[in-house]
């Protein structure tokens, strides 16, 4: 399934225990909504319940990571450099 992400959303994934995954889908079917909607409503409910204030400064997901990588920095290749490296038929 190849779906484009909506502009104001961020795609994420979590590992659910098999039994919880089944229960989420069963509950969604019983309430007539999607599992996605049920999960989003649950997250929003917990955040409201905890009364956590919204941060004054938003996390910029497009900025450099707050924890720098310890790996080697890679130089980005130009299209011309890529075409030089691959052999096309």
Image: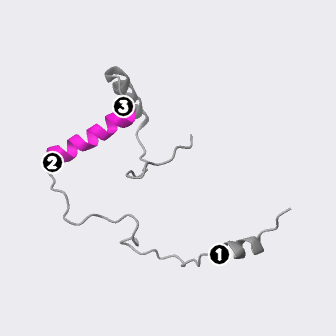
Could you tell me how many numbered marks the image carries? Answer: 3
**Pointer 2 residue:** 50
Q: Residue at x 43, y 48 (%)?
A: 6
Mark earlier in primary sequence (1, 3): 3
Mark earlier in primary sequence (2, 1): 2
Of 64 and 18, nearer the camera is 64
Q: Secondary structure at mark 2?
A: helix
Magenta highlight on residue 43: yes
**Pointer 1 residue:** 78
Magenta highlight on residue 40: yes
Q: Residue 27: horizontal and vertical position, in percent? A: 33, 26
Q: Residue 79: horizontal and vertical position, in percent? A: 68, 72
Q: Residue at x 15, y 48 (%)?
A: 50
Q: Name above or below for residue 74 compared with residue 49.
A: below
Q: Name above or below for residue 80 compared with residue 40.
A: below
Is residue 12 found left or right of 3 in the rendered image?
left
Q: What whole-number distance in Å separates the C-alpha atoms at marks 1 and 3?
A: 45 Å
Q: Residue at x 46, y 74 (%)?
A: 69
Q: Secondary structure at mark 1?
A: loop
Q: Residue 48: horizontal and vertical position, in percent? A: 17, 45
Q: Name above or below for residue 84 compared with residue 18.
A: below
Q: Quadrant of residue 41?
A: top left
Residue contact between numbered discs 2 and 3, judged by CB atoms under 8 Å: no
- Residue 24, numbered label: 3
Near mark 1 (Cα within 10 A), the count class, few <14, some 14-19 or many ≥20, is: few
Which segment did they paint magenta? Answer: 35-50
Q: Quadrant of residue 66?
A: bottom left
Of 55 and 16, nearer the camera is 55
Colour logic: one colour
Near mark 3 (Cα within 10 A), the count class, few <14, some 14-19 or many ≥20, is: some
Residue contact between numbered discs 2 and 1, judged by CB atoms under 8 Å: no
Q: Residue furthest right?
A: 89
């Amino acid at each position: 399934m190849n779906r484009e992400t909506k502009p104001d959303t961020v795609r994420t994934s979590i590992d659910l225990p098999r039994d919880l995954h089944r229960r989420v889908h069963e509950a969604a079917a019983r309430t007539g909504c999607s599992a996605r909607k049920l999960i989003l409503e649950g997250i929003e409910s917990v955040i409201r319940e905890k009364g956590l204030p919204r941060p004054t400064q938003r996390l910029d997901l497009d900025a450099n990571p707050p924890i720098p990588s310890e790996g080697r920095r890679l130089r980005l290749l130009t299209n011309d450099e890529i075409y030089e490296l691959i052999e096309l038929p």
